[in-house]
Amino acid sequence: MTPSNLTKVSEFFLLGFSEEPALQPLIFGLFLSMYLVTAFGNLLIILLISSDSHLHTPMYFFLSNLSFIDICFTSTTIPKMLQNIWKQSKAITYEGCITQMHFFILFAGLDDFLLTVMAYDRFVAICHPLHYTVIMNPQLCVILVLVSWAVSVLDSMIQTFMVSKLLSPCNNTQFSEFFLLGFSADPELQPLIFGLFLSMYLIAVFGNLLIILATISDSHLHTPMYFFLSNLSFVDICFTSTTIPKMLKNIQTQSKVITYEGCTIQVYFYIFFAGLDDFLLTVMAYDRFVAICHPLHYMVIMHPRLCALLVLVSWMMSAMNSLLQSLMVLRLTFCTEVEIPHFFCELNQIVQLACSDTFLNDMVMYLASVLLAGGPFAGIIYSYSKIVSSIRRISSTQRKFKAFSTCASHLSVVLLFYCTSLGVYLSSAATHSSHSSATASVMYTVVTPMLNPFIYSLRNKDRKRALKRVCGIRRWIQGNSRGSDADPSPMAEATEPIAPELLVVPLEMVPIPHARESRSWGTATAEPAVRSPRSAAREVSAVRSPPTAVKSSARPSATRESPGRARRTPITLLMNLLIILATISDSHLHTPM
């Protein structure tokens, strides 16, 4: 597929250190001994750390990872050099050179990152010894190693991708552009198609953008569920922006051409954001599983660090998959004019139009579909099977309905996304109707991102309140929520635990100190007592109502209030206000009491 690349090279020569035959045994023995010492020495460190429980600490955990990487790092280069000396050959194949370069960059980057992580571990141990075990907990250690691997893999794949474009052998393709046929060639239908897709694109972009702004602006929505939902909305905006703007431009300019670079970039980002959608839906299913099956431990399990880790891993996995698929597309060649019967550069259509051998591309594509699409889908099914079994144990029918309604929005999006996407690839394998495939692709590339804001926000009380704030419509909410304002997920209060900092306890359930007058004037002692709900409500309404309302609604009393009580009322309010401010400002006082 690479245009104007006439490279014929299929192997390279490694010159080594010296061409003198007398020095070859010395070089062979020297490097063989160093390689064996490195391999067995680092392997011994790994075995010692694994067998001794006293060494199960962050420092030795990082050290064991470093030892494993050092073994792999030396095994990337030294064995091939020893083989060339032994066989008196300096040749290395094109595939072998690309593979060696990939793993050399991978393990070199890992060495770099792990040394940095170990330096941070020593910094915490020396500068913050009392907080060492709290900061360097096992989860953080795993995150640091995992991020090191992910970044190194991404860097090595990018470098390999750039080199493969320069060294791709025997690629005689002369084409530099392709043609996207779209839905119809009828000129009369083009304005209709343009208006339809433009309206769907604008609804998808602005709807998901409102979701993001509402989540950011409303502190009540700073929970794991809405954190994942805002990420899903951002990905949906990018997903639709990958394909629709180019299609609208082609209709507007009456051109069906897309350049080779544009097609490659579109394939990359299309696979990238489609995979992100897949992973985020799986993460949201896990969030619902924890909220319903383990409601009391929800905030402990779904803490901010785990939420960020799940999103980060999703981004890394999607980036690596899309980069791999793009690399596989670059090896394809085309013999005739490439007319893609689709409205974007869809991977399956491009592979089918290639004139070179596509067996490896098909294997990688289907393997990635099974692992990166089937795996998350199996996780979603497992989560919902546990949710259903947990709901079945609830005795009340109303509570069962409320619990299941918390998952209705997510489940509908999952079914819409997976049924359409799987239908496209399964139907393309059974039939060769490209028009039906393009039409079905609209469902998961445009319709699903457009419907997500409506599905998640149409009857959600918290989300509607946040959207009203974003749109500038602010109203006072009086009394408890009525039937029309009720959340279609009423069980959310029971199944979605609220963060401690957002928990508000009703006043009538809290022991409130009464002011008991002492015999001395102007003094009072606090005596804990529990007021009745009716008296607490009267006091709350009296405090919340403005002074004019109090004067107008106050009934004439038979006796006038004493001057001492009137003077103590501002003091009491001031002292309680100081208590509230002190509790808010001091994090040590953020306790249930």
Image: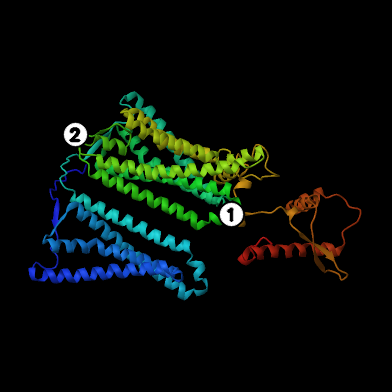
How many circles with numbers are drawn on the protein?
2
| Sooner in the amino-acid sequence: mark 1 or mark 2 | 1
* Residue in the foreground of this view, choosing between 556 and 51: 51
* Along the line of sight, the residue nearer the viewer: 542 or 432: 432
Disc 2 marks a residue whose amino acid type is Thr
Q: Position of residue 12 (x, y in %)?
A: 14, 56
- Specify the label residue 247 is tagged with: none
Residue 159: quarter of image: bottom left
Eyeballing the image, is 69 above or below 191? below
Residue 518 visible in the current orientation: yes
- Residue 444: quadrant of the picture: top left
| Residue 206: x %, y % from top left | 47, 41
What residue sits right under mark 2 in the picture?
Answer: 336
Q: Residue at x 67, y 60 (%)?
A: 592
Q: Nearer the viewer, residue 325 or 451?
A: 325
In what quadrant of the picture does the N terminus appear? top left
Identify the residue position indicated by label 1 in the image.
297
Q: Residues within 10 Å of mark 1 (few under 14, many from 20)?
A: few
Instruction: Determine crowd level at label 2: few under 14, some 14-19, many 20+ residues with C-alpha closer than 10 A.
Output: few
| Helix, strand or loop for disc 1 | helix
Give above or below for 374 relative to 509.
Answer: above
Q: Secondary structure at mark 2?
A: loop
- Could you say where residue 321 lies in the image, as x and y percent from the top left? 34, 48
Colouring convention used in this rendered image of the protein: rainbow
